[in-house]
Image (cartoon, rainbow, N blue to C red):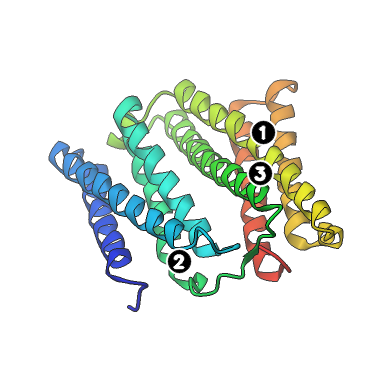
Amino acid sequence: MATLNWLYDAILYVYALSLLFYFSDFMDASRRAKRMGTGLLIFVWILQTLFLISRIVSHFEVATISTFEYWLGFCWLLVSISLVISRFFKIEFIVFLVNVVGFSVLALNLYSKPGNEAMFAISTTARELLIVHISLVLVSYVSLTIGVIFAGMYIFLHRELKEKRWSKYVRRLPSLDKIERYSDRAVIIGVPLLALSLSLAVTLLLIEGRSTLLLDWKVITSFLALIVYIIFVVNRSLLNRTSTQLAKLHIVAFSFLVLNLLASYVSNFH
């Protein structure tokens, strides 16, 4: 497999090894496997940080940002937050599931053509705004990704408890109340940041005189995803919906976010 360089190779291989140890803990509740997985994940975070810093330094004076750096930053945030969750919240399964997503994105990122730096064109006057926009949208995507994983966990646990199946996986999961609370907090963080990032994106297009791109599929699906998340928030706050219905609606809302990401392939920018 051809990769960018040995450091990116090392990140992938160590990350895969970390996930294998986490999977062993997932299957057999092995404390030794969990410690090994966590130690390797910390090493992955260090390697990712070094790689990300090297990319930032080498492209500091370049007026473009590629999708490669974009998704690399996304993976770095996922690993960082999963380590925080592992250290302070002790939610074992969420760390494994979040990093499965992180590893998948990191591996797929090899196909984003890192040599092509024209994916995000940045004018001199709008550079700072674009950096803020990208930072906000990355944190938003990470938060909403973690939120939808909690929503999936809620549906799984609710079904298992309803059918009175007390498996070892059920006993290791947090309570339904905790899962719902964590999912809600992720939405509380992610949705406002998504709205702010989209407002900055519109401002950037207007500043650069590219208002025609407001009709681009990427922009349209971005606002569509935001609208669906707002519908979720309204249902959560004002309407009498069950927690299971809300979890399913959460998954639907995230599906629109994924649709937005897929729209990048037919977009004229991003």
Provide residue 76's location: percent of width, then percent of height. 41, 49
**Is 242 drawn above or below residue 42 in the view shown?**
above
- Residue positioned 78% across, 49% down in the render: 202
154 or 129: nearer the eye? 129
Give the residue type that dot 1 points to.
Pro
SS at badge 3:
helix
Mark closer to the chain start, 3 or 1 = 1
- For the image shown, how many numbered marks are present on the structure? 3
Mark closer to the chain start, 1 or 2 = 2
Residue behind mark 2: 108
Quarter where residue 72 is shown = bottom left
Provide residue 55's location: percent of width, then percent of height. 42, 60
Q: Nearer the viewer, mark 3 or mark 2?
A: 2
Q: Is residue 244 visible?
A: no
Provide residue 8's location: percent of width, then percent of height. 33, 65
- Residue positioned 24% across, 57% down in the render: 14
C-alpha distance separating marks 3 and 1:
14 Å
- Residue positioned 70% across, 22% down in the render: 237
Residue behind mark 3: 253
SS at badge 2:
helix
Q: From the image, which quarter does the C terminus lie in?
A: bottom right
Give the residue type that dot 3 points to.
Ala
128 or 234: nearer the eye? 128
- Residue positioned 61% across, 67% down in the render: 119
C-alpha distance separating marks 1 and 2:
28 Å
Residue behind mark 1: 192
Q: Around disc 2, counting alpha carbons within 10 Å, would you say few (fewer than 14), some (14 to 19), or many (20 or more)?
A: few
Q: From the image, which quarter does the N terminus lie in?
A: bottom left
Give the residue type that dot 2 points to.
Leu
